[in-house]
Amino acid sequence: MHMHKERLFTKNFLVVFTIDFLLALVYFTLMVTVAQYAVDEFHATTSQAGLVTGIFVLGITVGRFVVGSIIDNFGHKKILFIGIIFYIVATLLYFSINNLPFLLFLRFLHGISLGFTSTATATLVAKILPENRRGEGIGIYSLALIISNAIGPFLGLFLINNASFNVMFICCLIFGFISLFLSFFLSVPPQQVAKEKNTGIKEGNVSKFIDLNVLPISIMILIVGFAYSTIPAFISFFANELQLMDVAGFFFIVYAVVIILSRPIMGRLFDRRGANLVIYPSLLIFAIGMFLLSQVNVTWTFLLAGVLLGFGYGNFLSTGQTLAVKLTPPNRIGIATSTYLIFLNLGFGLGPYLAGFLIPYTGYRGLFITLGCIILACLILYYFIYGKKEITKGAVTTISFDKNGM
């Protein structure tokens, strides 16, 4: 019985992992093609096409904000099921788009549905995993996003170049229906849901949407996500400036490979030795990667920067999420996860927009140096908000303040 509880790759884990992968695959498939769709079908301007892509992230943030306030009381499986239905309906509506305003509205709704499903899957996986292997488990689970990030853009571009936008929408619809089918095989212990339903939230209106226990680490992921978001937004422009466009695609391949190889190892390290041993080196390596990126002139340094950024940012992202779960009581895991992801999305939404104002003054090199300095400052911030409070005794890690924050 004890061995069964320690397993990571349970039926529930594999179902949640696959659902998250398929829905994220739809997101990344459309992310690289929907702007082109807006231009080809509705003669959108460049800024309008960018808005068609970006408004999806706003929808995700709204969806996570709403669902975070109800998920622990309503039940995780129900929220996931409703979210997938919503997701399928939104995907179906792509076939009936006849103008740009409707496309924008649909992208916003589609984003809300992903906010529902991704918060539900992230919360479910935190509940499903054994507590003493949660860091390792979330590290493995988060690979669903990394793999879909590698396959989705390739699939989208392949389909619109070799078939049509409608064929692409059909594929996205199929992924949605497979996810719905898989959701029927997900089993959440009834007593777990009942406990969550009967748990009253008495801390006030703010705590229905934001978990104050995880606010400090969430502010950190906002800053770190802000820094990282400038890379996918501007790396192609930077590579073009350096005449390295022929290797720009490989940048994200090495980035993804490093995350896939390192996350399970760093997750186990978190479980056995605590967050400090993962987060301090992750932030330091992330900063070094930014500084190296700012000095790139040749292919090998460009790809090495991708390696460092994958290790640094990739491991901070999953470790921060695990830490958010650790800092909150079991009945608040849904709100804690939602809080963390909301702040991550805010960072991703603000990053490219604000960086766009800096680039005319700093250039891309100056931008990456500035962001590297901000990441170094996060090392100090982390020390004060969590690092100095963590006490490690052998393989057991505790927090020197009340985890419930009450």
Image (cartoon, rainbow, N blue to C red):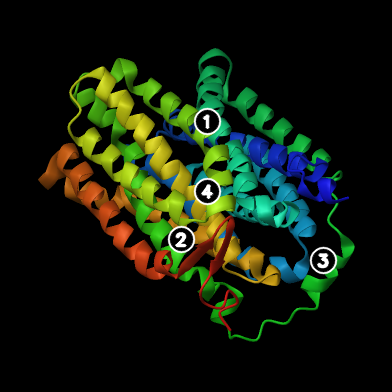
Q: CA separation, marks 3 and 4?
A: 25 Å
Residue at image point 33% right, 38% down: 231
Dot 4 falls on a residue whose secondary structure is helix
Disc 1 designates what residue?
261
Q: CA separation, marks 3 and 1?
A: 35 Å
Residue at image point 77% right, 41% down: 15
Which is more N-terminal, label 1 or label 4? 1
Q: Answer with left or right where residue 385 lies relative to residue 194.
A: left
Give the label on residue 343, or none.
Answer: 2
Disc 4 designates what residue?
318
Which is more N-terminal, label 4 or label 3? 3
Please tell me how crowded label 3 is: few (under 14), some (14-19), or many (20+) other residues with Cα within 10 Å. Answer: some
Residue 52, position in %: x, y? Answer: 45, 43
Which is more N-terminal, label 3 or label 2? 3
Image marks 2 and 3: residues in contact by CB distance under 8 Å: no
The answer, for residue 41, to whether it is visible in the render is no
Which amino acid does the dot numbered 1 rest on? Leu
**Circle 3 or circle 4, nearest the eye:** 4
Dot 3 falls on a residue whose secondary structure is helix
Which amino acid does the dot numbered 3 rest on? Val
Residue at image point 42% right, 30% down: 255
Which amino acid does the dot numbered 4 rest on? Ser
Toward the viewer: 235 or 87? 235
Disc 3 designates what residue?
193
Q: CA separation, marks 2 and 4?
A: 14 Å
**Circle 2 or circle 4, nearest the eye:** 4
Toward the viewer: 141 or 133? 133
